[in-house]
Amino acid sequence: MQHLGQMLANGLAMGCIYALVALGFVLVYRAVAVINFAQGEFVMISAFFGVMAATLLRLPLALSYFVVFLAMAAFGFIIQRLTYYPLRGKPHLTVVICTVGLHIVLKNGARLLWGPYPLSFPSFFRREPMEVMGILIVPQTLFIIGVTGSLFFLFYLFFKKTMMGYMMQATAQDPEAARLMGIRVDRIIALTFVLNSLLAGAAGLLLGPIFLVTTDMGGAVLIKAFCATIIGGFGSVPGAVVGGVFLGIVEILAAGYVSTFFKDGLAFGVIILILLLAPQGIFGEKVAERA
Amino acid sequence: MVLLFLFVTMIATGAFAVNTIRIGFIVPLTTANALIGWGMQHGAALAVKEINEAGGIKGVNIELLSEDNADTNAIAVNALHKVSASKPVALILGSTSSQTMAMSPIIQKAKIPTLIEGSSPKLTDHGNPWFFQPRVTDEFAAIAATRYVVQHLKKTKIGVFHAAEEFGLSTAPVIVKTLEELNLKPVAVVSAPSSDKDVSAQLLQIKNAGADAVIAWVLPAPGVLLARQMKQLKINVPLMANPIFAMPQVLKLMTPEDRADVYSVTDTVPDQDTDPAAQDFVKRYKERTGIMPDLLAAISYDSVKLLAKVIREVGTGPEAIQKALREGKGYRGVANTYTFDEKGRGAWRVMVVDVSGAGLKVLTTVSR
């Protein structure tokens, strides 16, 4: 039982990371109906910003986090202006391909800027685990779970209860109609990218201390976060979190009880099964195509 | 326009290049394995610099044609094609065993003498007569590592953790077989792809099986995470691994807690080799890069120097180089002493080191 509890705790932590990145997918999709395939690289850039602030500039860790968030907000705005904004109004496929290109540019740019070597990123917390009912939990893991839960709650409220959230959804569903309703569509889109970048910033800062910071770290979570988004239902905030946590737990249980070698194959097999039963995802809704 | 095109093509293919002896060098300069790739690049480049400063090979300079394999088979093969277009007299592959196997058929067809830094014994087992392995094989190293854990650390319940790539898959059976020869069975054998960041499921299997030691055969970056996660799961047993923990650039990523009770089996620890040539290499490498060289940097250095020696003696003909490498005995490099057997394997000594302390401590040396 303890063994199962330990695996569930670790799977939950990994699942929260996938959920955080998946939330970023959902945020952009809900606002501009585009899948941002550079989302993983946003996470990676944030982690490198963190390393620069903490080790190169030698800022106190709390100040480093604040500086990273400022930098990521600016980064998100600049990326939106350079990539999405010139392509607004163009077919969705064009924009999606642009995000794929952005993923490649950011990854290679990071290599040129920070080099190919993995780097370490300090944590607020000690590395020694705490023992809770026989389950060993590293403090950083609890922090990840707590932050993910809080952000999920905040975003859920944001989309359901705030005017800005409604405006973002209106912009995603029909930018022209939204514009006619008086919504400043361009500003909403810019804000979306900034918020997305901040979300990725949080993911990078949470992930950096537990794994090494490398230019490949974004890719490692991107595919799984994308799958989490699909499992949960594309565009659904609760779905992103449920999908992420589900995937994190399934893959660790597959490794622990079935086969470490076929872990990924088993996890994705379960995903395929779910999609066969619920093609729109667990929380997804069928959306009629626009005329 | 046609003439301009032809002119540009000739420039690109080096038709007007100054006469040099070209050695191709395919190595991971990006991705997580750049951690070892750049060391190899610096080691090879240092050797080339020294040879050229001393007048080259009979007055002709060596040109090192470096290409990145991006730790991917397809890109490694592309890099090989690109390098081959410049007609190198020899190749050095600082690539993992998976990529080396992918390049093998092309090299065999092209008949290029090739020094390979991958450690899988399959690289020389599969019969490419143009491959020479100046690196201790995983088979030799794994046997030494396993015997040390059982006979010196007195452990009997061994958990085996291996990478799900070729070098890990081929080494795990060697560890198991060695344990069987010592009348033991592993309590758990688990694997993980090198791209996995969280290996807690695998480690929990080892912990629940009651392991009193872990033998791991993994890549450097995953190895750091493995050592760390073992401590986080309170798996406080000795961890013996392949040479990854003997590499200075890997140790920089580890805290003293991560390094506690960790051992590595390695071809060499360059800064602890008392040979004057090795000490000189360490000094010049550190002046060039600011860090201590690891074994792969030393092997890359030796590979270039060995090729230069052979080419100086027999010329640049591929068959002559191949024959000279095969028949040469006891070339003393900075990493090892090389004598290539009929399969092309050339290094026959490993060291077991304790990485717990401030520096590496050589515990024992195992030779053929």
Image: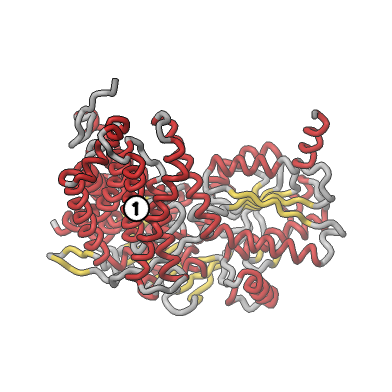
The reply to whether residue B181 is visible in this rendering is no
B256 vs B317, left or right, is left
SS at badge 1 = helix
Which residue is found at the position 31% from the left and 65% from the top? B230
Residue A206: quarter of image: bottom left
Q: Residue furthest top?
A: A291
Residue A89: quarter of image: top left
Q: Quadrant of the C terminus of chain B?
A: bottom right
Circle 1 packing at 10 Å, graded few (<14), some (14-19), many (20+), is many
Which residue is found at the position 52% from the left and 66% from the top? B266
B208 relative to A247, above or below: below
Which residue is found at the position 43% from the left and 63% from the top? B241
Which residue is found at the position 28% from the left and 32% from the top? A180
Q: Position of residue B88 (x, y in %)?
A: 74, 46
Q: Which residue is mark 1?
A: A200
Q: Quadrant of the N terminus of chain B?
A: top right
Q: Position of residue B195 (x, y in %)?
A: 41, 50
A203 relative to B101, above or below: below
B187 vs B273, left or right, is left
A264 relative to B64, above or below: above
Label 1 resides on the chain identified as A
Which one is in front, B189 or A62? A62
What amino acid is found at the position of numbered circle 1 in the picture?
A: Ala
B166 relative to A288, above or below: below
B105 vs B54, left or right, is left
The reply to whether residue A79 is visible in this rendering is yes
Which one is in front, A65 or B65? A65
Q: Position of residue B124 (x, y in %)?
A: 59, 48
